[in-house]
Amino acid sequence: MSWILVIWSASMGACLILALMHLLVWCRDFRSLPNLVFPLIAFGIIAMGACEMILMRTDSPGTYLETIRLGHLLYGIVVAASLLFIHCLFHTGRRWLLALAIALRAAAVLANETTGPSLHFLSIESLDRISFLGEMVSVVGEGVENPWVRLGQLAAIAQTLYVADASLRLWRRGRELDRHRAFWIGGSMVALFLLAMAIAGMISAGTLRAPMLVSFPFFGMVLAISYNMSRDLQRTALLARELESSERRLALAGSAARLAFW
């Protein structure tokens, strides 16, 4: 079994487990919207990872183009879910900036479906094989860049600005929990949006000969989100135990007071 398949299987398996865990949490508390949106992010990343495995193994330029088109559609879903997650968890984002970011990403997805085989390429004449993690994988050899890819880059800038602005406003609240969320969740999301934009842009422009890997960096974001939210769950459980203990003490105090009266 190749190292690529091992890493992909482990990463996507962890994504699936985390998604199911947060879905179960939401089933117990329907008001916890971040726990509903998180599985959408995780399932989208799993599907993106499957597309990237196809890209690395195919020898057909046509299949490569079709898979890139599908991958960009999935990426649009992951981005929209990520922005909604930040909005529901932080409660500090500017709504007009959120609407702008989602509208631009939706326009990029529409351009992906209507302006050519994909948003990134108008055509791919050939594929090359390179060594990656000890295995030969397919990369774009010669291709024609789709000029509409600039719309996707503009959408990436808008979504990054929204997350950065919401994280900064959350950080300024000054509370330890808020700053932890702003740094780990907001910071990781900003860094990975920029990384994904750079990878896709350089591959489309022909300046980077590498597999189209976006899901693996996003897996790091999923881990950061899940770790932070697990701390929230632990804190909630601790508060629940403290409340239960306080209620028991109040009940004992009430019983003692009635006994003293008699």
Image (spheres, rainbow, N blue to C red):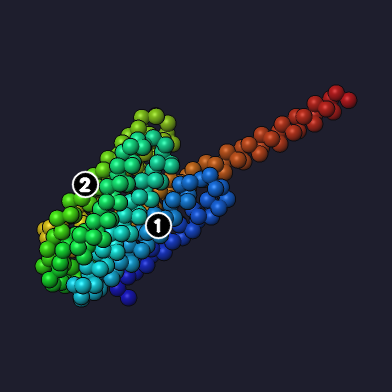
- The residue at the far top in this view is 261
Q: Amino acid at mark 2?
A: Leu
Quarter of the rendering occupied by the C terminus: top right
Quarter of the rendering occupied by the N terminus: bottom left
Which residue: 80% across, 26% down? 257
Find disc 2 in the rendering and name its residue.
154
Residue 229 appears left or right of 129: right
Query: Label 1 neighbourhood size at 10 Å, few (<14), some (14-19), many (20+)?
Result: many
Residue 139: x and y in percent read 18, 68
Picture quarter containing residue 169? top left
Which residue: 39% across, 35% down? 92
First in residue order: circle 2 vs circle 1: 1
Cβ atoms at labels 2 and 1 below 8 Å apart: no
Q: Amino acid at mark 1?
A: Ala
- The residue at the far front in this view is 114
Residue 121 appears left or right of 22: left
Query: Between 138 and 125, which is closer to the camera in this rendering?
Result: 125
Would residue 97 be seen by someone viewing this image from the given angle? yes
Picture quarter containing residue 128? bottom left
Which residue: 80% across, 29% down? 256
Find disc 1 in the rendering and name its residue.
42
Residue 100 appears left or right of 12: left
Query: Between 77 and 238, which is closer to the camera in this rendering?
Result: 77
